[in-house]
Amino acid sequence: MKLFLTFALLLASANAYFIFVDANEEQCFFERATSGAKLSLTFEVADGGFLDIDVKIVGPDNRQIYKGDRESSGKYNFAAHMDGAYTFCFGNLMSTMTPKTLLFSIETSEPRIQVTEKPENPENHKLEEMVQQLSGTLTSVKHEQEYMEIRERVHRKINENTNSRVVYWAVFETAVLVSMTLGQIWYLKRFFEVRSFV
C-alpha cells in the first residue's frame, strides 16, 4: 500500500517557475509526456508593461496546440496526443523596452495504470483513489495560493503607486495655494500703500 501511494504521488509532477522575459525575447520550456498524459499550464504575469505576454504550446510533431496573444493570466489543460517533448513558449516580442516578470507552472499527470488482478480489499482501492484525488486537489490549491499572492502583489503595487500620486498632487496643490495666497497678500498690500511723489 505504501509503495503504491509513493508511486501515485510520483506520477503527478508539477514544475513551477518564476522567470524574466526581456523585451523582444521569447523563452521556451520543454516537458516530456507520454500519450494520454494530462498536461496543465497555469501562468500569471506579475510585472512589466501592460501585464501581457504571448503564450504558445507546441506538440512533439510541431503541431500548435494553443496560442494566446497578450494574455495576463490563464490556465490551459490538454491531453498529450503522442509521446515526446511538449514546448511551452512565452514571448515578449511585442514590447520594445519593457521586460516582463512571469510565474508559471506545468503539471503532468501520467495516465493511471490499471491493475488487472482483483484488489484484496475494495475499500483499499477506494482509499487509493481518494488519496490521488486529494493529492491533485492540494496541488491545485497550492498553485491557486501562489497566483493569488502574485495578484495581491500586483494590486498592492498599483495601489501604492496611486496613493503616492495622490500625495504628490496634494503637496503640489498646497504649494500652489500657499504661493497664490502670498502673492495676493503682497499685491493687495502694494495696492493700498501710500506713495509720495517728490
Image: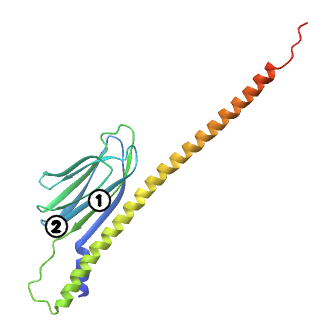
Q: Position of residue 180 (x, y in %)?
A: 69, 29
Note whether 138 is above or below 16 in the view shown: below
Tell me what residue is drawn at x 9 percent, y 87 percent: 117
Sequence-first tag of 2 and 1: 2
Look at label 2 and name its amino acid: Ala
Left or right: residue 6 versus residue 118 is: right
Note whether 89 is above or below 113 in the view shown: above
Using the image, tell me which numbered label, if any, was put on residue 42. Answer: 1
Using the image, tell me which numbered label, if any, was put on residue 37. Answer: 2
Q: Position of residue 163 (x, y in %)?
A: 54, 47
Residue extending farthest front: 192
- Mark 1 lies on a secondary structure that is strand
- Mark 2 lies on a secondary structure that is loop
Left or right: residue 83 versus residue 39 is: left
Tell me what residue is drawn at x 26 percent, y 86 percent: 2
Which quadrant is home to the C terminus?
top right
Note whether 98 is above or below 4 in the view shown: above
- Colour mapping: rainbow
**Frontmost residue, 190 versus 67:** 190
Tell me what residue is drawn at x 8 percent, y 84 percent: 116
**Frontmost residue, 93 versus 44:** 44
